[in-house]
């Protein structure tokens, strides 16, 4: 494990900030290119990328990359927040009821046996069949 001197930390921060200011206009652009920026700084200091990212984070200057939305990782998320299993099942029940004829009953005992991901996936399939 490589140790960081105060001078190396300061150099990493300055180099990172200089690259961000010179090459990217917005924080969004900086976040999209965070991996490349940190790799450039790490290579210049002969340090690891993860160690450099850690030092930049501790210094409060690192702008992290935003996670990409993925249908495979949670399905019916709203606003980026993870929904609980109960919320996913409630959403599935609502989707089923809106997709079927009036008077349709949904067996809650069966729905409760589903995982949150399974409920989100099924809700997504129902919505897809309706063209939503």
Image (spheres, rainbow, N blue to C red):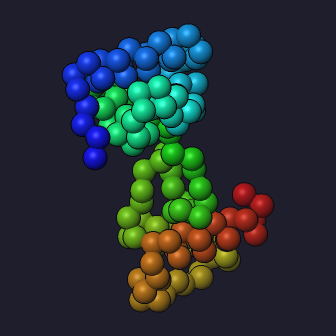
Depth check, front residue: 45 or 75: 45
Q: Position of residue 25 (x, y in %)?
A: 57, 13
Depth check, front residue: 74 or 35: 35
What residue is rendered at 35% in x and 17% in y? 11
The image quadrant of residue 36 is: top right
The image quadrant of residue 120 is: bottom right
What residue is rendered at 43% in x and 17% in y? 15
Quadrant location of the C terminus in the rendered image? bottom right
**Up-down relation of residue 18 to residue 52 (above or below):** above
What residue is rendered at 50% in x and 17% in y? 20
Can residue 95 be seen? no
Depth check, front residue: 107 or 2: 2
The image quadrant of residue 130 is: bottom right
| Tag count | 0
Q: Position of residue 70 (x, y in %)?
A: 59, 56
Q: Position of residue 82 (x, y in %)?
A: 42, 56
Can residue 27 be seen? yes
What residue is rendered at 48% in x and 31% in y? 43
Q: Residue most toward the left?
A: 6
């Amino acid at each position: 494990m490589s140790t960081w001197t105060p001078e190396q930390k300061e150099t990493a921060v300055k180099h990172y900030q200089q690259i961000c200011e010179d090459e990217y206009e917005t924080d969004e652009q900086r976040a999209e290119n965070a991996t490349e920026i940190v790799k450039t700084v790490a290579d210049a200091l002969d340090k690891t990328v993860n160690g450099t990212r850690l030092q930049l984070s501790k210094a409060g200057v690192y702008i992290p990359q935003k996670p990409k939305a993925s249908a495979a990782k949670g399905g019916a998320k709203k606003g980026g927040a993870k929904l609980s299993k109960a919320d996913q099942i409630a959403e599935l029940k609502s989707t089923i009821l809106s997709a079927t004829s009036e008077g349709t009953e949904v067996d809650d005992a069966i729905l409760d046996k589903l995982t949150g991901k399974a409920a989100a996936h099924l809700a997504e399939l129902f919505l897809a069949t309706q063209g939503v």
